[in-house]
Amino acid sequence: EDKVVQSPLSLVVHEGDTVTLNCSYEVTNFRSLLWYKQEKKAPTFLFMLTSSGIEKKSGRLSSILDKKELFSILNITATQTGDSAIYLCAVEAEAGGGADGLTFGKGTHLIIQP
Amino acid sequence: GAGVSQSPSNKVTEKGKDVELRCDPISGHTALYWYRQSLGQGLEFLIYFQGNSAPDKSGLPSDRFSAERTGGSVSTLTIQRTQQEDSAVYLCASSLDLAGAGFGELFFGEGSRLTVL
C-alpha cells in the first residue's frame, strides 16, 4: 500500500525564521511528488518533482527530492504570516495514466507568529 | 469563471438522506478527481474520471457512494443513506491528463462541506 508521511505534523515559528518541512514516501512505481499549500479548503499547487537532486525554487520557497532515500523537503525562508497554512505532500504512482490518483500525507500545519 | 466550480458549498442533511454534490471542471480538462478531507486526515482519493474511459472507483468507501460524469464535463458525486461518518469536505479537482503522461498540476474547487446530523 502506498504511503506518504509528513513531519512535523505542526510547527509554530516566528516571522523571519526558516522552516523545513519533510515528506517521506513508499510507493510502487513512483512518478512524481507534489507539494500543495492549503489555506481554507482548496489546496494550491506549489511544486512537482520528478528528478532526484534538482531543486525547484519559487521566491522564498524551494523543494528538493531524494529518490534514493525516498523523501522530499520543502524549505521556506524569511517566513511571513501569510505562509501560515497546511502544507500537503502527495505522491503520484505510475499506474496506467494516473488511475490511482494521488496519495496524500496528512499535512504539516505551519503557523507563523508575528 | 475559469476555475473548478463546486456546489453546494455547504450542505447539512439528516442521517439517512441522499445528497448530490456537483463539480464543474475547467473547460478542456479531461481528468476529474473527487477527494474527501475529514478533520485531521489527509486528502482521501475517491474516484477518477479520464476522458471516456471507465472511471477508477477504487477509492469509494462503500456502495452508498457513486459518481458520474456526463458528457466528459460536469460530475456529480452521490451519497445515498448518509451516515454521520460521511461528514467531510468533498473536493473536486481537474487537470489536463495527456493520455498517460501523468497529471502534474491539479486545479481544485473550493469544496463542498457536508455535515450529516
Image: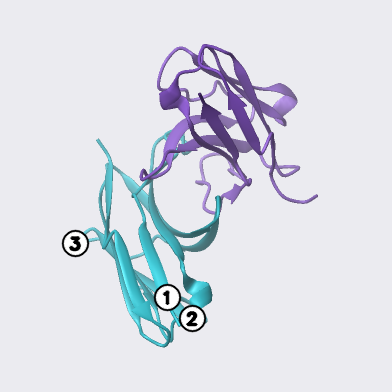
Chain colours: A cyan, B purple
Count residues near mark 2 (Cα–Cα under 10 Å), then give few for <14, some for 14-19, many for 20+.
Answer: some
Q: Nearer the viewer, mark 1 or mark 3?
A: 1
Marked residue nearer the N-terminal end (2 or 3): 3
Q: Secondary structure at mark 3?
A: loop
Tell me which residue sits at (27%, 41%) in the image. A28
Q: CA distance from mark 2 to mark 1?
A: 6 Å
Tell me which residue sits at (60%, 28%) in the image. B12
Q: Which residue is mark 3?
A: A69
Q: Which residue is mark 2?
A: A80
The chain under label 3 reads A
Q: Disc 3 marks which amino acid?
A: Glu
Tell me which residue sits at (66%, 39%) in the image. B9
- The answer to whether residue B22 is left or right of residue B57 is right
* A80 vs A6, nearest the viewer: A80
Marked residue nearer the N-terminal end (1 or 3): 3
- The answer to whether residue B71 is left or right of residue A57 is right
Does any portion of residue B62 appear in the rendered image?
Answer: yes
Height in image: B92 above or below B66?
below
Image location of residue B110, percent across then percent down: 63, 47
